Image (cartoon, rainbow, N blue to C red):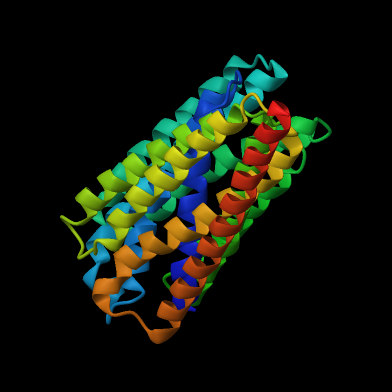
Amino acid sequence: MNQFEIFFDGLYLSLVIFLGIRMLLINHEDSKTLGAMTLLLGLGDSFHLVPRIIANVMDNGFVVNSTSLFIGTRVSSITMSVFYLLFYFYIKKTKDLKNKGLDITMLGLFVARLITVLVSFKSDANMDLISNLPFVIMGLIDIVLLFKNRNLETFKRLYIYVFFSFLFYIPVVLFKKAYPSVGMLMMPKTVMYVLIVLKLYRNLQRNFVKRDLMEYAFAYLLSGILVGASYRELSKVFEVTKYMSLAHTHLIVLGFVLPGIFYLLIKNSDLADEKIKKLFNLYNLGIYLAFTSMIIHGLVDSLMPMRLTEIGLISISGVGHILLTISIILLGTSALRSREIKRA
């Protein structure tokens, strides 16, 4: 199970953080709010999931990394609170709700959550439990509002995802000390977060056009810079390997440079946008798998992970590079062929 969690956490963080950056760059009135929500979700969770990835390949890793894990869970507690506060204001803006009493209630709950989380840094188990009360109430308010507006396409199924995220979360808060295995519920909770993010991302999406290649390219450039900065900072705390720095260069070259070249080749061509979208989705999947495996490699290789982990990383990386190769060939040949047809 520990080996599975390594891949689960790594793939989750890569997806959510990249989508957060991508959403910020979309030309939409809600892109800043939804992008900030998603990026906060990913970055906040990384504070405790990165130490968990490392702990899962170490002997007695959860004891050795207990301080990092403790601080990380508190950081993610704060960022998740901001996430649901912003979610509330997104719902409010979309439906043009005017309820000052509810606004004050949400802000009050957020402040209470923030204060109790900060107090819980003293490792007070009771305060840790108390700090979750305002958070759960914030979530319930969002769930009720989403349920009331469930017929609106923008909010379709979101109340289900948020409801189940809390349904999986609450037993962990209540019983994790007595029954540590209940912590496994954090995985389906995370799946709910992914579904929330994907729905919010779809709310921002428009019909694919060739110029979107450059938006993706810029998102990959920013992601590459973020990975480079993360490598530098993480190396001060953990024994990360240079594999992680390869993710930095891969994202810049494969994520920024190549899509830029593709865009220059096809921007004035007659190549159908739908065809480009399908091929580029394949390309995106390849990059996602390849650079995620590099990041995980960088985090765990120095700790000599189990053979099963090594096989998993090789497999994910291999599939990613195969998809990249296929998509590059198809995109390149399609772009060149369309230019030749236009000249003719």
Determine the residue positioned at 62% across, 31% down: 266
Is residue 195 visible in the rendered structure shown here? no
Question: Residue extending furthest left?
Answer: 236
Identify which residue is drawn at 40% across, 31% down: 111
Indicate the position of residue 315 as horizontal and vertical percent values.
Answer: 51, 74
The residue lying toward the viewer, choosing from 51 and 268, is: 268
Q: Does the rendering let one see residue 230?
A: yes
Instruction: Please identify the quadrant where the C terminus is shown.
Output: top right
Query: In this rendering, is residue 244 above or below 319?
Result: above
Q: Where is residue 298 in the image (x, y as percent from the top left)?
A: 30, 64
Residue at the location (44% across, 72% down)?
313
Residue 82, position as x, y percentages in the image? 45, 35
Pick whichever, 226 or 8, lies toward us. Answer: 226
Residue closer to the observer: 272 or 248: 272
Position above or below: 101 against 191: above
x and y percent of residue 302 in the render? 24, 73
Picture quarter containing residue 234?
bottom left
Determine whether, in the image, residue 182 is placed left or right of residue 248. Answer: right
300 or 337, which lies in front?
Answer: 337
Question: Quadrant of residue 154 in the image?
Answer: top right
Total of numbered circles in the picture? 0
Residue at the farthest bottom position: 307
Which residue is situated farthest in the right direction here?
151
Write down the quadrant of residue 146 in the picture.
top right
